[in-house]
């Protein structure tokens, strides 16, 4: 109800909002009572913003629920992550600007390594080089033809990630994923989850078998894991809902896909954090909402690299003055979910957030870290309500009622 109410209260002005998103920001200490990655990092600039702004912890989906990147980002932008949940395949397809069509089935793929027994030893094939990924996708595209007449498309995302798309009839997404999400197990069978998906499942089994045969020639990327099945669907844009003119600055295709599905314009290609901040400066006069996505905090957490995640956070802190130099009316710094290095994956722990604006009420938070943030004025709140708070601080919401 609150989200629909915010839509009705929106009023336009020229104030600007920046969402600086450190993917997987939240963490855990390496030993009981120790410091998280964020607390360990030397972040004088973020600490200063936290002390003068307002802080809190965000739950991307709900208490105890570990979110995927897709629903977590939808929540960041004020979309109910359950109502608008969509398979990651569609996000990947949109991010790669693949021509979307009704009836297609889109899948997120990981190239992986299996041993002689067919068991997965590395779900990311050693974080395969993007150039090698591109070569494998070309080979799959050339060699795979399906007897059903359906067409399969293979497109590189980045490193070990790729998009697999199926076209040919009214395909179903209710198919079991082939990625068991852990090593030591074989890839799973793509069986139907509902009777209506039987035909699609048969096509998927032929597809995965032919992919397996082609990849048998590879040393490292000798298997593929499929998940996040999704068909195309349209979403109300951030312009339609909130009257914003949003820009997304992101290097990974999936996050570009989320932005594209929500009607954000995409900045030119960037590779480094410094290039992302420069893109923010270059486009600042033409937009009023900015989504700046930084992936490296998440990838270091997923790889179990505690010290490296700390270093990424510290590097971002050195660039905060360049962001503040733009003098945004509202600056939000947070993550989409927690990726503790000690867990080497996403977790259910709430995510620290700071909001800096001239209208912030003083609170007890004195630094940017998990323990300090819970003393902040935002408390612990659903992530989907964050954008409404940012809009309020930017004067973009009218009074409710007489």
Image (tube, rainbow, N blue to C red):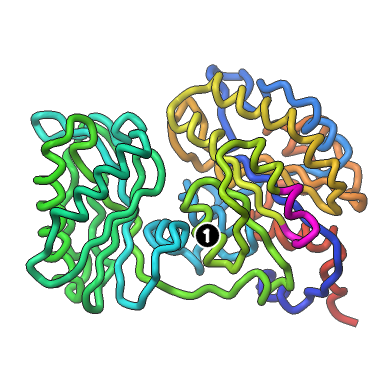
Chief SS of the magenta region: helix
| In the image, residue 166 above or below residue 362 | below
| In the image, residue 331 above or below residue 113 | below
| Left or right of 93, for residue 123 | left
Going 61% across and 72% down the picture, which residue do you hit?
A: 237
| Left or right of 277, for residue 400 | right
| Residue 230 image position (x, y, % from top left) | 35, 65
Residue at the disc numbered 1: 258
The range drawn in magenta is 280-289
Going 11% across and 38% down the picture, which residue do you hit?
A: 216
101 and 134: which one is in front? 134
- Mark 1 burial class by Cα count in 10 Å: few <14, some 14-19, many 20+: many
201 and 35: which one is in front? 201
| In the image, residue 78 above or below residue 344 | below
245 and 131: which one is in front? 131
| Residue 89 image position (x, y, % from top left) | 37, 58
Tag 1 secondary structure = helix
- Residue 205, quarter of the rendered image: bottom left
- Residue 371, quarter of the rendered image: top right
| Residue 192 image position (x, y, % from top left) | 18, 65
Indicate yes or no whether the magenta region holds residue 6.
no
Going 47% across and 25% down the picture, which residue do you hit?
A: 342
Indicate yes or no whether the magenta region holds residue 284.
yes
Going 52% across and 31% down the picture, which residue do you hit?
A: 340
- Count every numbered label the image shows and give the total: 1
Quarter of the image with the N terminus is: bottom right
């Amino acid at each position: 109800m609150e989200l629909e109410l915010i839509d009705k209260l929106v009023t336009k002005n020229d104030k600007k909002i920046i969402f600086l998103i450190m993917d997987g920001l939240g963490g855990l200490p390496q030993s009981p009572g120790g410091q998280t990655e964020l607390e360990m990092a030397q972040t004088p600039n973020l600490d200063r913003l936290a002390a003068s702004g307002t802080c809190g912890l965000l739950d991307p989906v709900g208490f105890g629920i570990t979110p995927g990147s897709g629903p977590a980002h939808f929540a960041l932008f004020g979309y109910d992550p359950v109502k608008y949940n969509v398979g990651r395949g569609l996000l990947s397809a949109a991010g790669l600007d693949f021509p979307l069509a009704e009836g297609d089935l889109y899948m997120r793929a990981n190239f992986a390594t299996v041993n002689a027994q067919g068991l997965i030893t590395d779900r990311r094939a050693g974080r395969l080089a993007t150039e090698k990924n591109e070569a494998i996708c070309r080979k799959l595209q050339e060699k795979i033809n399906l007897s059903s007449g359906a067409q399969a498309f293979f497109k590189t995302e980045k490193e070990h990630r790729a998009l697999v798309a199926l076209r040919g009839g009214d395909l179903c997404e209710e198919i079991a994923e082939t990625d068991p999400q852990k090593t030591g197990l074989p890839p799973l069978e793509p069986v139907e989850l509902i009777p209506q998906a039987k035909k699609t499942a048969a096509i998927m089994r032929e597809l995965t078998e032919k992919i397996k045969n082609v990849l048998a020639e590879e040393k490292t990327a000798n298997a593929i894991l499929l998940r996040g099945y999704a068909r195309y669907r349209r979403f109300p844009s951030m312009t339609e809902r909130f009257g914003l003119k949003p820009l997304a600055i992101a290097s990974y295709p999936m996050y570009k896909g989320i932005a594209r599905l929500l009607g954000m314009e995409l900045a030119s290609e960037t590779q480094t954090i410094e290039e992302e901040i420069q893109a923010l400066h270059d486009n600042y006069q033409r937009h009023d909402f900015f989504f700046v996505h930084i992936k490296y905090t998440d990838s270091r957490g997923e790889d179990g690299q505690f010290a490296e995640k700390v270093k990424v956070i510290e590097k971002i802190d050195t660039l905060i003055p360049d962001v503040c130099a733009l003098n945004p009316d509202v600056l939000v710094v947070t993550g989409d979910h927690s990726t503790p290095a000690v867990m080497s994956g996403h977790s259910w722990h709430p995510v620290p957030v700071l909001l800096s604006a001239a209208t912030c009420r003083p609170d007890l938070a004195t630094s940017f870290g998990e323990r300090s943030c819970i003393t902040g004025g935002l408390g612990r709140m659903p992530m989907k309500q964050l954008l409404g708070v940012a809009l309020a601080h930017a004067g973009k919401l009218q009074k409710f009622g007489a």
